[in-house]
Image: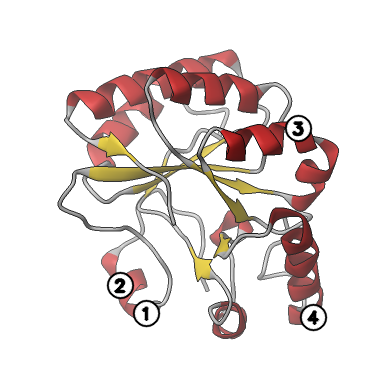
Amino acid sequence: MIFMIFQPPSIFQLLFPSLIWRIPNEENKIFLTFDDGPDPEATPRILDFLAEYNAKATFFCLGRQVEEYPAIFDRIKKEGHAVGNHTYNHLSGWTTSNKKYFEDIARADEIIGSNLFRPPYGRIRPSQIRILKEKYKIVMWDVMSGDYDQRQTQERLSARVKKLVRPGSVVVWHDKYQPDSNLIILLRMLDYIQSLNLHFDKLS
C-alpha cells in the first residue's frame, strides 16, 4: 500500500517498480504536476504562470471537475500541457472496493481520455496496481510539495522543494483551493528551479 509522504524512500520504488516515481534524464528535466483540478480560480492563474515561464506541466484531473469546468480543461490541453486521470470522485484505493474504484476511474476516463493515472492521496492497493498498469502509466512522485497543508509556512514549503528537487523529479502541486500565498510560493519555485538550469516538461 502507498501513502502520502514528501519524498518516498527508495524501498518503495523497489517494492512497486511498475509505478513511476521519478524520470531520470540527461536533459535536466523535471516534471511539474498538478492534482485535483481544474478549478475556476487557481487553474487559470497557474496556466498564466506556466506560460510566462514557457513551462509545460501535467494536470491530473478529477472527472467531476472536468465536467463542471470543460473550458478550463480545454485550455490546459490547448496550451500544450498533458492531462491525466485522477479518478472521477477523488477516491482512496485503500477504502474503496476494487469494483467501485475501477468504475470511478473508467467514468473519468470517458471524459479525460489519458493513459496517465495518479491515485488520489497516493493510496492504491497492489491488486489495483496489477489491473490498472495494463492500461495506465501509474504516476506517483519524487517530491510532494505539501501545499495542501495549511499549517505549512511559506518558508517551510519553499525550503522543502528546494531541498528535494533534482533532475528527473516528479513534483506534486495542487490546482484547487489555492490561497494567494501558495501561488506566490509556486512562482518562487518556478524561479528557483529555472535558476538551477532545470527545465520543465510534461509527462507523456
- Front one among 86 and 16: 86
User: What residue is at 30 percent from the left and 44 percent from the top?
Assistant: 30
Three-letter code, disc 3: Ala
Callout 2 environment at 10 Å: few (<14), some (14 to 19), or many (20+)?
A: few
User: Where on the picture, by quarter, is residue 163?
Assistant: top left
Give the residue number, with chain letter if any, for mark 3: 71
Q: Earlier in the sequence, mark 4 or mark 1?
A: 1
Q: Earlier in the sequence, mark 2 or mark 4?
A: 2
Give the residue number, with chain letter if any, for mark 2: 11
Cα distance in 3D space between marks 2 and 4: 29 Å
Question: Label 1's element?
Answer: helix
Cα distance in 3D space between marks 2 and 1: 6 Å
Q: Position of residue 119 (x, y in %)?
A: 60, 61
User: What residue is at 55 percent from the left and 85 percent from the top?
Assistant: 130
Q: Position of residue 168 (x, y in %)?
A: 26, 51
Callout 4 environment at 10 Å: few (<14), some (14 to 19), or many (20+)?
A: few
In the orientation shown, which residue stands out farthest toward the right? 68
Q: Is residue 204 left or right of residue 36?
A: left
Give the residue number, with chain letter if any, for mark 1: 15
| Circle on res. 99 | 4
